[in-house]
Image (cartoon, helix red, strand yellow):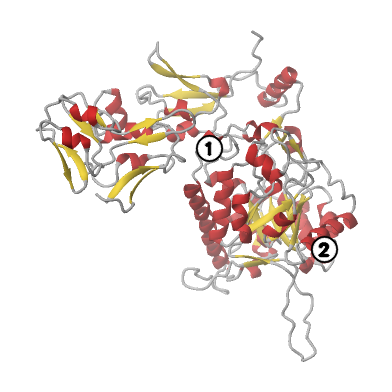
Amino acid sequence: MPVNYFPAEFEVIRNYDKCISCRACERQCANEVHYYDADFGKMLARENRCVDCQRCVCICPTGALKIRPNENAFRKSANYTQPLMTEAYRQAGTGSVLLSSMGTPKDYPVYWDKILLNASQVTNPPIDPLREPMETRVFLGKKPTKMKFDKNGELDTTLEPSLTLNVPIMFSAMSYGSISKNAHESLARAAEELGTFYNTGEGGLHKDFYKYGANTIVQVASGRFGVHKDYLNAGAAIEIKMGQGAKPGIGGHLPGEKIKEDVAHTRMIPRGTDAISPAPHHDIYSIEDLRQLIFSVKEATEYKKPVIVKIAAVHNVAAIASGVARSGADIIAIDGFRGGTGAAPTRIRDNVGIPIELALAAVDGRLRHEGIRNEVSIVAAGSIRCSSDAVKAIALGADAVYIATPALLSMGCHLCRSCHTGKCNWGIATQNPELVKRLNPDIAYHRLVNLVTAWNHEIQEIMGGMGINSIEALRGNRLMLRGIGLTEKELQILGILHAGE
Amino acid sequence: MKKIYVNEERCLGCHLCEYYCAFANGSEPEFYKAFRLGRNAVPRIKVEDGNGINFAVQCRHCDDPQCMKNCIAGAISKVDGVVKIDHEKCVGCYTCVLSCPYGCVVADGGHSASKCELCTANGGTPACVKNCINGAIVFEERGETA
């Protein structure tokens, strides 16, 4: 047997006074960590297989389990940390690119946590959202630039196609394939009940979910998986994915093991083949090319649906967004580098892109400066973690936000970041029927609705405190924001003052 | 009347319902102690699993209960639609265990037979329903005759 260069990442701590050997942990662990040793008459664990998904901890009827980081430590170095050493051992063993899932765990600055919100005192009274109306409805799409009248002097009230959201929160793109059918069903039903939208991601739309079309955003990505005329017409809007915050510059990759019958059919590809999206759209090498694709999908849908262009937040995002706004897109979604993914090369996820806060501020500022901000709506994505992040994003200039990780959390995800293994113990990022079952859409959809409803209440409370009664009045209202512990340059990019100013 | 139903699409085969049943019908107030000290009852629900299909089985409270018909001691009766065993009368012959077509009457070791009585003695929602981790077991009215 070869030398095992790195120890188990986690320790399984079992309180044997409480363990009743019911073996529920064993039955519920897809990684086969727990097992019953008949000779010893007790449960034991193969700790090197544990990914810390916490499923066993959550279902243990006696609370006998605890998973914690393995305290075994390599000799300390602030430069060569244990994860870096482990990764080198792993790559030396496999010769492969390191894969990771979900958002980067690295300790980059989170600007949301360095921005404080304002509240009213004395001169402009706060508003109590429980007693007074508080509008959180948002319309996404082009806004009219001038009033038009017909021959009789009547106001022309026709508007460009738009989306109406009851809450300024949508579920961002997660493909069927990367997540399970039950997860998709939960998102679709929640979006319908909340009066908002979920996004198919690049995996096409399962035939059972066409009925949720009015609350669906259908995505067209570089792989064009599952894209056909009926698909484009099934959704309320079409999103062209140019990039993803977690992995700017590369396309999606769904391993063949996840391409089962239903996924293959939905994606229109053979069963068991890897679904590899090209890094670029092979027909888009300029803003003019993007414009062609935008108008191709508009033509296919008779100009009835708004088109979203999703770009990753990269260095020159403001200039790119300006081009996108001029290309005919109705909505721009910007995805920050802390956003999640079902699978990405670790080095790219952890090192490429820029934070959404800075990208959003830069894009909103640039579009306003160029006088084209009303040509597009902006959706901020990539680690909107809670309602106050959403409020700050809107005050920085977003019309609405996309959330995905919090949506997964409400369905049970514990961010073990092992989606790429396809063995999700929570039934979310897997296509194994036995595991998919674990996500009961009747429960999960309700939890999603609860989460967004709770956030919306909090958004209303925060707005009320500011003396604002409509989300429209909060958008781009950077006077409601103050930086704390930020440099002059950071404040300048964010377009906000420092606390105390 | 309300009965317990199991949705095999949702049942994960975790067997936890068996433990919650055994605890609810036992005498020990602390869950882990009930099993560590053997103060649990024999579960009246049993998960049949394997081949990708899992299904928890418990008393159907039949229209024409075979267990009741065959009870030599007259210990089994149907009260408000719930088939019950009177442990005072039960002689422990286990004819009911043998005659139940669903295998839902269990020998509980105390020279008596036991079965699911919808937790009527434990108050409220049946323990298996309350504690199912995936909402697979429900307690509801489906318009069946009692």
Write down the residue under mark 1: A426
**Quadrant holding the C terminus of chain A:** bottom right
Badge 1: few (under 14), some or many (20 or more) residues near its Cα, within 10 Å? many
Residue B27 locus on image (x, y percent): 21, 32
Q: Amino acid at mark 2?
A: Gly
Badge 2: few (under 14), some or many (20 or more) residues near its Cα, within 10 Å? many
- Which chain is home to disc 2? A
**Nearer to us in this view, B69 or A135:** B69
**Quadrant holding the N terminus of chain A:** top right
Residue A427 locus on image (x, y percent): 54, 38
Residue at the farthest bottom position: A152
Residue B61: which quarter of the image?
top left
Q: Residue at x 89, y 49 (%)?
A: A285
Left or right for A93, reference A171: right
Residue A278: which quarter of the image?
top right
- Which chain is home to disc 1? A
Task: Respond whether the residues carrying marks 1 and 2 are from the same subunit.
Answer: yes
Q: Residue at x 29, y 30 (%)?
A: B103
Element on which disc 1 rests: loop
**Nearer to us in this view, A489 or A409:** A409
